[in-house]
Image: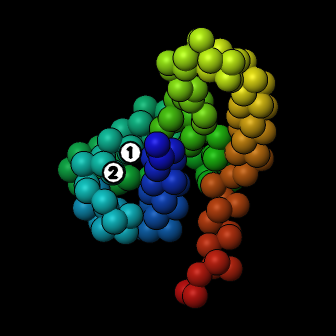
Amino acid sequence: MAISTRFSVAVHILVLIDSERSKQITSDHIAASVGTNPVVIRRIMSLLKKAGILHSSPGLSATYLTRSPAEISLYQIYTAVEGSKQLFDMHKNPNPNCFVGANIQAALDETFIAAQSKMEAELKDVSLEDIIHNMPSKTNL
């Protein structure tokens, strides 16, 4: 089972909107950049708008970030699109009559919680501006 791509798509959307802030930007344009359907883009933009990160409305009004990229952490973006979802999910029906099945969840729980905490701490330390500044060094623009 793959981890959701909503987070990376959300970051892509926000970087694109910031980089093209002087233009009218549509979900079709963003979808072409992301390589997905405009409906997917609109759903993610709706979550970002609900979280207060993005302003957008139908029609000809502008789409823009509600604060500077330096003030938006990757953690804020992550929670906007993923909610309180844990990075790792536990399988639901291990066999309680099997030694491993009966104990695997308890054995993994502490490790999964620690990994989640470390991931969240890292995302809190990185701003959208950091990602924007990394873009030229990672592409041949």
Q: Is residue 54 left or right of residue 115?
A: left
Image: 69 above or below 99: below
Residue corresponding to mark 1: 45
Relative height, residue 34 to residue 44 (above, below) = below
| Residue 74, above or below 96 | below
Q: Residue at x 64, y 47 (%)?
A: 74
Q: Residue 36: which numbered mark, if any?
A: none
User: Does the image show residue 98?
Assistant: yes
Q: Is residue 85 left or right of residue 45?
A: right
**Residue 26, x across and y down, in percent:** 28, 59
Give whichever of 17, 95 is nearer the camera: 95
At x 38%, y 52%, the residue is 63
Question: For residue 30, which quarter of the picture?
Answer: bottom left
| Quarter location, residue 96 | top right
How many dots with numbers?
2
| x 50%, y 20%: residue | 92
Mark 2 residue type:
Ile
Figure quadrant of residue 73: top right
Between residues 73 and 84, which one lies in front from this camera angle?
84
Name the foreground residue: 45 vs 9. 9
| Residues packed near mark 2 inside 10 Å, few (<14), some (14 to 19) or many (20 plus) | many
Residue 41 numbered mark, or none: 2
